[in-house]
Image: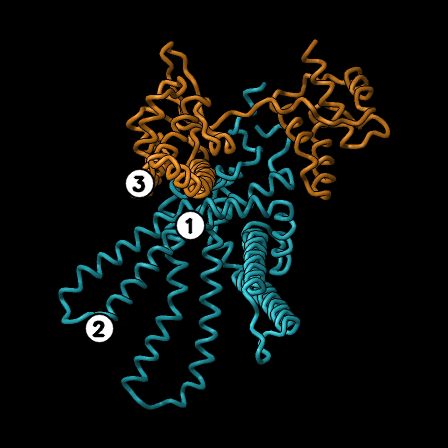
Amino acid sequence: MAQKFTSLDPAQPLSIGNVVSAALRLYAAHFKSYLKVSLIATLWAFVPLLVVGLIAGFFVVARSYFAALGLIIPAWLVLLFYCMAKFLAYSAAIARLAFGELTTQPETAVVACRFTNARMWRFLRTGFFVFGIFFGVGLLAYILLAILGIIAAVVLGIGTAGRTPDLQTSLILGLIALVLLLAVIAGFSWLAARLSITDVPLAVETNITAMNTVGRSWELTKTHALRIMAILFVAALVSLPLGIVSQIVISLMQALLAPYFASESEPAYGLIIVLMAYGLGLLTNVITIPFWQAIKGVIYYDLRCRREGLGLQFGTR
Amino acid sequence: MHFLNRITLQTPESVELGFTLAGIGNRALALGLDYTFLALLLTGFIVILSLVVEPLSDLLAIFNLGSSDLELWIVAIALLIVFATYVGYFVFFEAFWQGQTPGKRLVHIRVIRDDGRPARIPQATLRAIVRPIDDLFFVGCFLIVFNKREKRLGDWLAGTLVIQEERGARAQNLIVAPQAPAIAQQLLAITDISALTPDDFAILRNYLQRRQELTLQAQEQLSQQLAEQLQAVLQLEQRPAEVSAALFLEAAYLAYQQQSRS
């Protein structure tokens, strides 16, 4: 029976590297459908910006009707929230598709998108909630550091006339600051890992609210924050080449276009470069979103296996 | 489709062997670890070198051997040692440590030849020589992702594969309650435990191995659920009196083991 316990066993948890490999293989096997969903999501995220451009263009040309801004700005805000919700819902659909594949309950992209779109406002609320947590913790850390800094300054009497700290004190202070900085970075990475899959339970489970999808992912990631940090690190490492390639393409284009313009400070040249860089950025997003969403889907699946024994039942195989 | 890449190899003796390929994730992680170790090793080396340089030049001066080129020499030798360490690290470990560098060992992957035999010095050397190209320009990463056998340039050249170690047999030390053996006997007496298929037993073992890691709520729910399913499989109307779901599962595990041994 020993041969039944290979890494092929579907109920067996995955190693850090295998989470990344599995996500990439899922993406490769469903490249077209994931890419299409990702493209739709990215286009939704692009719409508010496009509208801003159009509005700005209109006012530049018309140079009047500024009173209408009182109406246009609220309308645009509504549009922004709508588009953000759409973006989040479509992105989450990819994580849902990946999870469905892993639990051998595959769905078509259309069905998955319909499911997540039906709860798009919950995705938006989840997004705000998570953003709020990060913002709050960030603010708290900032205030704490500021207080520490003030205390240090007062105790050492820095800033009062005629007292400059000697070399030793500055060195120690610098060291403490470095340690604090590292601690802050580590803390935020930990928080990011704990909150990395907040949209996945909402994309997969039924009867779930914007609040308890965050609670669910908090509970699931409880004992595995370090593993998730490692997974995200490896995933970033693997997706690094793509970022570098797009950087190379941008500099190539710059070099190719430069001869057609009198000088590099010409506004048209700058505009074209900015637009191209932005377009390429969008394209990179379209390609990388499915990868990260698949990673999140696999992490969620793996945590369900580890923490809830997903897939453990008799007589199914 | 399965979510990890499997291949079958033919050995020179025409034996078919199945392996799971390492995958880009494991390989990236192993590489990251190896480069960290190498960086630590080289930093240590440079620190020691910088400590030694001054006494050494003093010593040479005593014997009137000091020369103005000394520093150049030291830099040259140091560079040579750094390069030798970089290549040698991978060659040494892959050739003499069953195809595993420390990073690979931690990640549970290893290098083998295309026909399943272990990698030796020629293969390890070829892999190590091409490594700078593979790593610096991410050629290797793209190749691993986009070809079926996950070979980077060095693997093509050396005729090697990187596979996952199969990890079986960790199941020996399952903790069961002290009263479980007695209930196992009881189960053997009242039911036909062989109604349990090997696959079912695998699930049972899987559950017992991993239950400590489950959330409390999941432990409760899952043991209840599995116990009910197991009762159905064994066609038991009800569990023996005063036996909890978890204990019932432990006893069934022991009973199956005992029955398959006899």
As drawn, the chain in cyan is A
Instruction: Give the class, few, some or many, for how many residues have Cα within 10 Å of label 3's Cα (few <14, many ≥20).
Output: few
Question: Which residue type does callout 3 highlight?
Answer: Ser
Which callout, 3 or 1, points to the residue nearer the camera?
Answer: 3
Q: Dividing the picture into quarters, in which one does residue A145 lie? A: bottom right
Secondary element under disc 2, as helix, strand or loop, is loop
Residue occupying the point 23% across, 75% down: A267
Badge 2 is on which residue?
A: A265
Which quarter of the figure is the N terminus of chain B placed in? top left
Mark 3 touches mark 1? (CB < 8 Å): no
Question: Which residue type does callout 2 highlight?
Answer: Ser
Indicate which disc, 1 or 2, sits on the residue closer to the N terminus: 2
Between the C-alphas of marks 3 and 1, the distance is: 62 Å
Which quarter of the figure is the C terminus of chain B placed in? top right
Badge 1 is on which residue?
A: A290
As drawn, the chain in orange is B
Badge 3 is on which residue?
A: B67
